Image (tube, helix red, strand yellow):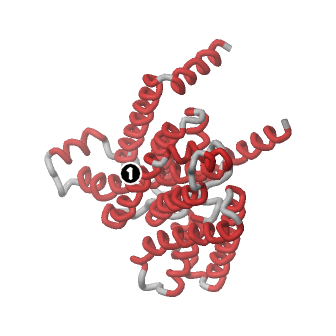
Amino acid sequence: MKSLQKFCTLMQWVRETTSGKAALLVFLTVVLFAAFVWNICTGSTALPLKEALFAFLENDVESSYYRIPIYVRLPRGVGAMAAGAALAVSGSILQSVLNNALAGPSIIGVNAGAGFAVILTAAVMPSMSFFIPTAAFAGAMLASLLIWFIAARTGASRVTIILAGVAVNTILSAGIDTISTLFPDVAVGTGSFMVGSLSGVTISSMKFALVFIAVGLVAAYLLVEGINILALGEETARSLGMRTGLMRFVLLIIAAVLAGSAVSFAGLLGFVGLIVPHVARFITRGDNKMQILVSALVGASFVIICDCIARVIVAPFELSVGIIMSFIGGPLFIVLLLKKRRQVND
């Protein structure tokens, strides 16, 4: 009982005081840094941090202690951080704007749009695999615009956007299954992308996506006041002079840019944009500005840790990070559904 009281007191301090919020951000940053260091040292070949640091400082480009961290694990760690932060913030925006705890890029069709574009590109232009990241980004954006178009034609409210997203997600998923059936070789070739994988990512292959992610994260933070006003309800937001439809459209595009940029190089990572915002919301309790920051840090750490587990759990073989995330995220999603049902019954 005393431990529970201490925990509640700590959470109250974190939520209500400036020093508590600062301490939380510092703690999460330290966790992220530790996860990134673990990423550098972990894999089928273990690398002592001391040896890798010495090789880097001495610029010993011929040493495996230099080449593996710099050319393999550093880009992979950067990609994991960027994808995790982008997907978590994207999910946080969607859940806040749509006022639905089950909203996320993988639920309302954004990820399905990217997946359909990738598998269609691989089937129609098999020799142009370099075009896959661009196709993924374009597919996510087009799916988002289609969702908005359908919702706008029927009234761009929170409910219609969610319903339109679910409908688009179903149609695109059926398209993916159809192409996979007609072109089985394509399904095999794009398997890692459909599951979600960071294997083989390089800085050059994701440099444009990193720019879009950085811009999207900054834009999400700057528009957090719009999220706060929308959270007050449709009528209240309009009475304050907000064009709610336009604001939802802008925020939906930002969420799509973040998700599309992430899946363009990391594949269809699931559950990040669904689970992490709930963790952030539990910690921050209604402070959307802190929720954006906490979502980004927790999402980045979560993906890096899952990627490290994927590389060592069956070493020297490697699982896709999406598989590990599904094993962790699936049970958490079930708990979330049971919690929502309990709240409805109460």
Front residue of 170/193: it is 170
Quadrant assignment, res 49: top left
Q: Residue placed at 25% from the left, 56% from the top?
A: 67
Q: Residue furthest left?
A: 58
Q: Position of residue 316 (x, y in %)?
A: 45, 55
227 horizontally vs 43: left or right: right
Front residue of 246/107: it is 246
Q: Assign the N terminus to one quadrant of the image.
A: top right
Q: Residue placed at 60% from the left, 33% from the top?
A: 285
Amino acid carrying label 1: it is Gly
What residue did someone put label 1 on? Answer: 77
Q: Position of residue 241 (x, y in %)?
A: 57, 49
Quadrant assignment, res 236: top right
Residue 71 at least partly seen:
yes
Q: Residues within 10 Å of mark 1 (few under 14, many from 20)?
A: many
Q: Assign the C terminus to one quadrant of the image.
A: top right
Q: Residue placed at 49% from the left, 39% from the top?
A: 289
